[in-house]
Amino acid sequence: MLSFSKDIDILKYEPSLFGELHLRSQVVTKGNGGEINGTEFTISQADFNNDYVSAGMVIYLQSTDGALDGAFEIVSVDSEMTLTVSVLRADTEQTPIAPTQAENINYYICTYLPQSNEILFELTQRFELKPGSMESGFDAENIIEPETLKQCSVYGTLAIAFMMLAWDAGRDKENLWAKHKHYQQLFEKARQRAKVSIDCGSDGISDITYSGASARLKRD
């Protein structure tokens, strides 16, 4: 488990972080000459596997004629040169939704996984689990329903991302700092509300619960 949230979760809140405000230092791959056919995006001379592209990331696509311009879900990596992509869905269990068909597409993939990994470390430290608390006998994999921490992870990741952007002298610092503070407050409130159930025996049954508002684990 690398994080409690994915880039597509960030996309639901702040699509500009994959467009005009994307962190150029965190673009894992980019190129031009791509083509969309249904939900299939194909680009020659690419190696998505070698670039560690994975499902749950976000790709920005812009055709030279302007017919296609936006951020889309990466549903799956089908080969080193082919991705299944989709218009943002309400539920990842839904059938992928095809973007506008286009060719001569410029693309880049920017990821915020480094920031969400930092939030995973912070949350597991708070909940006395590995990797945040290395002396613990349990880790994030022992959480029965890690999805309960998704919103908390999204807020924390957004807070870090906007803080990084605010340090860029060429941007609107006041607005970016306001965004950082807003999401930091949401993160702290979500962390206080969070309750985590731990399975100590690998039987899928909760043995210990942890409340973000308390300072200790409690056995059920």
Image (tube, grey):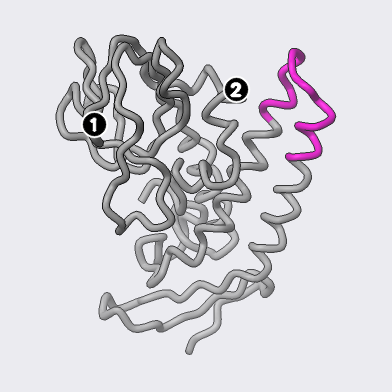
Q: Which residue is mark 2?
A: 20
The answer to whether residue 131 is above or below residue 219 is above
Q: Nearer the viewer, residue 98 or 92?
A: 98
Which amino acid type is marked by label 2? Glu
Circle nearer the N terminus (2, 1): 2
| Badge number at residue 83 | 1
- CB-based contact (under 8 Å), mark 2 and mark 1: no
Residue at position x 40%, y 66% in the image: 138
Q: Is residue 42 above or below residue 137?
A: above
Residue depicted at x 49% and y 86%: 219
Please check the rendered image and state whether residue 169 is part of the magenta-colored stretch, yes or no: yes
Task: Determine the CA span between mark 2 and mark 1.
Answer: 23 Å
Q: Is residue 204 magenta?
A: no
Dominant SS of magenta comes to helix
Give the class, few, some or many, for how many residues have Cα within 10 Å of label 1's Cα (few <14, many ≥20). many
Would residue 122 be found to the left or right of residue 64 on screen?
Answer: right
Q: Residues within 10 Å of mark 2 (few under 14, many from 20)?
A: few
Q: Is residue 100 left or right of residue 24?
A: left
Q: Position of residue 17 (x, y in %)?
A: 58, 31
Decide which of 59, 178 is in the foreground and name it. Answer: 59
Range of magenta residues: 164-179
Q: Amino acid at mark 1?
A: Leu
What is the number of the mark on residue 131?
none
Residue 194's x, y, as percent?
A: 59, 69
How many discs mark residues in the rendered view? 2
Examine the rendered structure and indicate whether residue 44 appears above or below residue 37: above
On the image, the x and y values in percent for residue 11 come to 51, 41
